[in-house]
Image (cartoon, grey):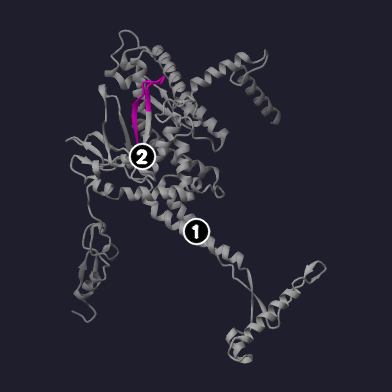
Amino acid sequence: MSKHSYPRVREGSVKFKSQEAAAAARGMGLFGSAPYVAGDSHVETMQSFNPSNSAADSEVLNGRDKVSARTRDLSRNNGWAAGAITKECDSIIGGNFRPFLKPDWRLLGLSSEWAKDFKEEVEGRWGNYADDPRKFGDTTRSQSMSQMFGTAYRSYVVEGEAIALVNWRRMRPTKTTLRIVDPDLLCNPMDAADQKHQRGGIDLSRDGVAQAYHFRQGHPGSAWADVGGMTWKRIGREGQNGRPQVIHFYDKLRDGQTRGISRMAPIVETLRMEQQYSKVELQAAVINAVLAAFIRSPMGPDMIDEMFGEGDGSAVLDMNVDRQKFYGDNGGIKIGGARLSMLYPNDEIGMVPTARPSAQFADFEGAILRQIASGIGMSYEQLASDWSKTNYSSARAAMIEIWRGWTAKRTAFAQGFCQPFFMAWLEEMIMDGHIKIPNGAPEFYSHWPAYARAKWIGPGKGFVDPVKEAQAAALRVSLGLSTLEEEAAELTGSDWSDNIEQIKSEMNDMPEGTLHPMAEKFAKLLGNTSDNQTRSED
């Protein structure tokens, strides 16, 4: 072996000159010893990262109350959190969240004409019930149905779940009512520890099916004495014929999970730290504004007393009195309307440096807000309301990406929370004879989902460029990729059937000789005018 050759020792994919070098590298944690770095305990950056594996409910239920308390506090006191929650609720639920009935007439063996008539009657009765100013649909008579759905969705965002009770109030025009329930009230009786078949206030079957819910009859944090805080009521998930009694909606992320966790949980720490950082920068700016300038004296009190006094502090006092008198006597001197600045002998003006807020504050805050926006499922531009650096293409791409996620959330919430209540309401309408089904039609309870099938409509996606969006919608319809009904619901949140009926009414009311924009002759006239204009320009 030559003096320049060394024994080679392989460590993973790296060769070392000696065993000592390889051991030193292992000691420094530079190279792993497992196929996946994520599962390696020797890599230095992973040595302190040792989370434990726990059951789904062990992860959620143990810290759920504290997470909920913190997210509620942020929703009250953090502007970014409050704005993000409000924007998502407004975009998904809005002010008129309603079902667009689509009964499965093929499965029911009925005609499409019956389906159209049934749809119009059900939607008409639902609209009258849901938007009744007397608010009979709310058990507490404080909100309309759309407002209640908005409250439930807000609870889902902030606390991770939406809970409601389907009640029956005999003295109301429509007896089916909805009561939104605070998730804090759902807990084990007497605050008992979780068990295999009772966790988080929910009784579970052997298959993990939620069978009943235990609700505390008063909040333990009430400011008044409430004996209900130590009493519980057990309510079954469903009543007779499968009628919903408790509606519980949450994102089930793992098998064995029975309660939801706030969707804001991953960004609570970031929101909190960003809030503190912004507060410190604001305080620094305020201090800079208040203490913009000061007067600097050449000698301190000790030096003045030592040079001119007898050690009793009288010299300092006399000098301060003399300085105060000087500034008082000369503070009002003006020349040509401008105040003349005069300083006491040997005094000079000093300026407070204005380096705060720091020059990097805006960029740093923008990076933090992008992280927060990603965590909550929206774009930075939506969260910060900052469109200064956005063009049409990027805005359109962001809207499509965000809208895809919001559409999934809307569909999940509508099917998991709104649809069960709508089915309970429709049951009352049909069983009490307010809405009739044809003789010989399939039995209602055995085909309940087919009669009640609906697509829920909320606010439309809106437009970045109205002309381009309308042209694209027309092109999709002409190619058979979409329908006018879907485009109306998607872009404006409207019901195409209602639009057509209104257009018919407008056409009939138009003065004679006046063309409605939807009229075929008007479209041809517009096309001819455009062609003539093009020819004249050529």
Q: Is residue 453 visible?
A: no
The region drawn magenta spans 162-177
Give the left or right position of residue 232, taking residue 318 as reference: left
Q: Is residue 238 or residue 423 the one in the foreground?
A: 238
Residue at left 46%, top 21%?
128
Residue extending furthest left? 206
Residue at left 65%, top 26%?
530
Residue 291, image x, y percentages: 61, 68
Residue 498, image x, y percentages: 51, 20
Give SS at disc 1.
helix
Q: Is residue 291 or residue 455 the one in the foreground?
A: 291
Whole-Å distance between the Cαs marked 2 and 1? 32 Å
Q: Is residue 337 above or below residue 385?
A: below
Q: Is residue 360 above or below residue 533?
A: below
Q: Is residue 424 above or below residue 95?
A: above
Give SS at disc 2.
loop
Q: How many marks?
A: 2
Q: Which picture quadrant has residue 302?
A: bottom right
Residue type indicated by callout 2: Asp
Residue holding disc 2: 182
| First along the sequence among labels 2 and 1 | 2
Q: Is residue 176 magenta?
A: yes
Residue holding disc 1: 278
Q: Is residue 233 or residue 300 the one in the foreground?
A: 233
- Quadrant assignment for the N terminus: bottom left
Q: Is residue 507 magenta?
A: no
Residue 82, image x, y percentages: 47, 46
Residue type indicated by callout 1: Ser
- Quadrant assignment for the C terminus: top right
Q: Is residue 99 or residue 322 the one in the foreground?
A: 322
- The residue carrying pointer 1 sits among few (fewer than 14), some (14 to 19) or many (20 or more) residues within 10 Å by Cα, namely some
Residue 464, image x, y percentages: 54, 38
